[in-house]
Every structure is written in structure tokens, then in C-alpha cells.
Image (cartoon, helix red, strand yellow):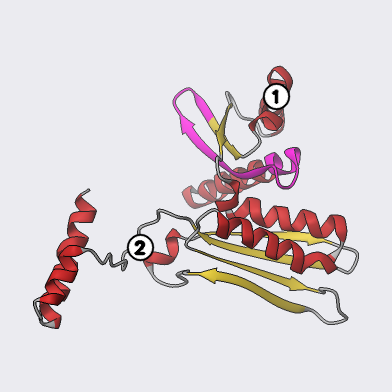
């Protein structure tokens, strides 16, 4: 019974998240988080357009609250807005933006929209990014195009630091899938090595490999404490 209840709760959460995204439209909401508190449910909507989500005098928030009560049987839902200050580093917003461009102008614009999105990410200072566009682009057979730059981890614990998202564009030529992965600036990777005076001094003293490795480990421990 407990397993069925757990699955039921997660299913309801998924339905709520998808409904909120559909209500405000593609490209407006990055993610929806649901928290349970003693006084009711807290729905956090992450967006780069808070004014659009809130509406005039909070009318859209009030409408969403009423729907959550009536349709999803929530007792006391409270909607909060989390503003995304740099949408160029949010993988979901980037993927949705490319999808909207393809739906509006056609699949033949996949290169222009992908390079434009990649340029914004790179100019913003991201450490790395990857865009994968697949489908009829345009051709009789499905194709896959990859656009990337910089440093991007794909395996191990470090891969969890990469923001990933997917989106779908429904074009006249057919369905086009978009996958986006972004490594934001300021992210400290577990295997990152900073070459500073301390490390250079160890090299100047003709230190052995083991001594240099020990210096690197000490620096990593100090970074973790900070």
C-alpha cells in the first residue's frame, strides 16, 4: 500500500508540474517545485518573466491557486515565484527558446537558432555547453546535429553539476527534439586544479610527482572547508 501511495503522490506532482507549464506556455517556466509544509502545499515556479506569471494585480496567481484547489484537490496551495536572473544559463529555457523558434520559422532555421543560443551562453561566460538537435532538419531522413564549446562533464559525480534539459518542437516537417546541457560559470568541479603560486613553487623546487599531488590534495581540502 505504501508503494502505491508513493507512486500516486509522484504522479500527482508530475501532473501539477506539467499543467503549470502548459498554463503559462512554452518558454515561460523553467521548472516547478512542490514542497509540503504544515500549513499547506508550496508551489515554486522558476521563471525569467515573473511579471507574466503573476499577472495584473496577481490575477494569474489567483487563477492558478483556484485551479490547484479544484482540479488537483490541494487544500491550501501557496504559489511562490523564483526569478531566474540569467536565463542564458538555464538549460530548459534555452531548449524551449530553440523549440519556439523552429515552430515559428520552420526546421530550416535550426542552425541559426542553435548558433545564436550557443553564442549567448558563451558570451555570458559559461564553462561549456552542448546543443543536440535531432529530426528532419530539413530532409527526408532524420538527422542529428551537435553544437558545442568548452568543457562539459558527461559521466561521474561531476556530471551532476551540469544543467540538462529537453524540449520538443512540432514543425511542419515533423517533430524535432532539442537537448541542452550547460556548465555555468563559477561551478567548482571536483577534479578542478588551480595553478597558483603555491603549486608553481612546488614545481620550481623540482618536487616529485607524489609531492605535487599532495600539494594539490591539500588545496582541494582547503577549498571544501571554505
Disc ID at residue 189: 2
Residue 67, how many percent across, how many down?
Answer: 71, 29
Residue 64, how many percent across, how many down?
Answer: 69, 29
* On screen, residue 173 above or below 27: below
Q: Residue furthest right?
A: 172
Marks 2 and 1 in Cβ contact (< 8 Å): no
Q: Please check the rendered image and state whether residue 207 is part of the magenta-colored stretch, yes or no.
A: no
Residue 112, how many percent across, how many down?
Answer: 76, 65
Q: Residue furthest top?
A: 57
The residue mark sitting in front, 2 or 1, is: 2
Disc ID at residue 66: 1
Q: Residue at x 65, y 54 (%)?
A: 94
> Which residues lie in the magenta part?
19-41
On screen, residue 171 versus residue 38, left or right, reads right
Residue 177, how many percent across, how many down?
Answer: 72, 66
Q: Please check the rendered image and state whether residue 22 is part of the magenta-colored stretch, yes or no.
A: yes
Distance in Å between CA atoms under marks 2 and 1: 43 Å
On screen, residue 4 versus residue 18, left or right, reads left
Q: Residue at x 59, y 51 (%)?
A: 88
Q: Residue at x 53, y 38 (%)?
A: 34
Q: Nearer the viewer, residue 105 or 31?
A: 105
* On screen, residue 161 above or below 64: below
Disc 1 crowd rating (10 Å Cα; few below 14, some 14-19, many 20+) is some
Disc 2 crowd rating (10 Å Cα; few below 14, some 14-19, many 20+) is few
Give the total number of marks visible in the rendering: 2
* On screen, residue 140 above or below 38: below
Quarter of the rendering containing residue 185: bottom left
Amino acid at each position: 500500500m505504501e508503494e502505491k501511495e508513493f507512486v500516486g503522490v509522484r504522479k500527482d506532482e508530475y501532473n501539477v508540474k506539467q499543467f503549470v507549464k502548459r498554463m503559462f506556455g512554452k518558454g515561460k517556466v523553467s521548472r516547478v517545485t512542490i514542497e509540503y509544509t504544515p500549513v499547506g502545499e508550496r508551489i515554486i515556479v522558476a521563471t525569467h518573466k515573473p511579471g507574466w506569471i503573476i499577472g495584473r494585480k496577481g490575477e494569474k496567481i489567483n487563477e492558478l491557486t483556484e485551479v490547484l484547489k479544484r482540479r488537483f484537490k490541494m487544500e491550501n496551495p501557496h504559489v511562490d515565484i523564483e526569478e531566474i536572473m540569467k536565463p542564458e544559463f538555464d538549460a530548459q529555457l534555452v531548449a524551449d527558446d530553440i523549440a519556439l523558434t523552429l515552430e515559428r520559422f520552420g526546421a530550416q532555421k535550426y542552425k541559426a537558432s542553435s548558433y545564436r543560443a550557443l553564442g549567448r551562453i558563451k558570451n555570458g561566460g559559461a564553462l561549456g555547453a552542448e546543443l543536440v538537435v535531432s529530426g528532419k532538419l530539413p530532409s527526408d531522413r532524420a538527422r542529428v546535429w551537435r553544437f558545442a564549446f568548452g568543457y562539459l562533464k558527461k559521466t561521474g559525480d561531476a556530471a551532476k553539476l551540469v544543467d540538462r534539459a529537453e524540449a520538443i518542437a512540432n514543425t511542419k516537417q515533423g517533430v524535432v527534439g532539442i537537448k541542452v546541457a550547460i556548465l555555468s560559470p563559477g561551478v567548482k568541479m571536483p577534479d578542478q586544479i588551480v595553478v597558483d603560486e603555491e603549486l608553481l613553487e612546488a614545481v620550481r623546487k623540482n618536487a616529485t610527482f607524489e609531492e605535487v599531488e599532495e600539494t594539490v590534495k591539500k588545496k582541494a581540502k582547503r577549498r571544501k572547508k571554505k
